[in-house]
Amino acid sequence: MGASCDVTIDRSTHYHPWANSEMGSLFSQSWPEAYSPSLADIEVHQKAEPEAAAAAIAQIVKLIKSNQELQQKDLEFQQAALQAMAAAAASQDQAHKEMMAMVQAECVAARAQIAELIELNQESQQKALEVQQTAAASQGQAHMEIIQGISDITTTIISDLMRP
């Protein structure tokens, strides 16, 4: 089991709290049993505490400023990264727009060529129909001329036969 701790504090003589315990023997070299600070010790101690506190506060302020500077740099790096990502996205968007414009221009050109080919095809069909109609008319005319020729020959033969 643990050692019992019988602590007696005599505030008038500023004993260390463990002075009368088993632990007190460990601190006997740095904390004599009957330590009574002098007025000069108290003044030095009172001056040292504010100086130590001021030094600690200065160190804390310095650390806070350092932390704020690091946070500011981190924020700047994050903003730079976001700007770089935005620039990359804008560049990619611009490249996409340019590519789409090229594709659209090629589509317009292809549609114009198709329209031209359709018009040429219609003109060719119209010319073919006209040639066909001309051929049919010519054939009909030739046919009519043949029939007329046959009719004329037949009429001549019949007239010759009917003469005495």
Image: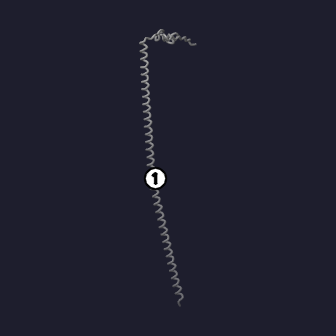
Name the residue nearer the viewer: 152 or 50. Answer: 50
Q: Name the residue that disc number 1 marks.
A: 104
Residue occupying the point 47% across, 57% down = 111
Q: Name the amino acid type tagged 1.
A: Gln
Question: In the image as oriented, which residue stretches furthest toward the right?
Answer: 1
- In the displayed structure image, the side of residue 47 where residue 10 appears, left or right: right
Q: Residue 15: image x %, image y %? A: 49, 11
Residue at x 46% of width, y 52% of height: 104
- Provide the secondary structure element on which disc 1 rests: helix
| Residue nearest the viewer, comparing 46 with 80 | 46
Q: Position of residue 30 (x, y in %)?
A: 46, 11
Nearer to me, 25 or 146: 25
Q: Residue at x 51, y 75 (%)?
A: 140
Q: Quadrant of the N terminus?
A: top right
Which x, y percent locates residue 59?
42, 24
Q: How is the image coloured?
A: one colour
Question: Extreme top residue here?
Answer: 34
Is 89 above or below relative to 44?
A: below
Q: What is the crowding at mark 1: few (fewer than 14 residues within 10 Å), some, or many (at least 20)?
A: few
> How many numbered circles are shown?
1
Q: Quadrant of residue 162?
A: bottom right
Viewer-nearest residue: 130 or 80: 80
User: How far across and how far down the image is residue 46, in percent?
Assistant: 43, 16
Image position of 141 with respect to 83: above or below? below
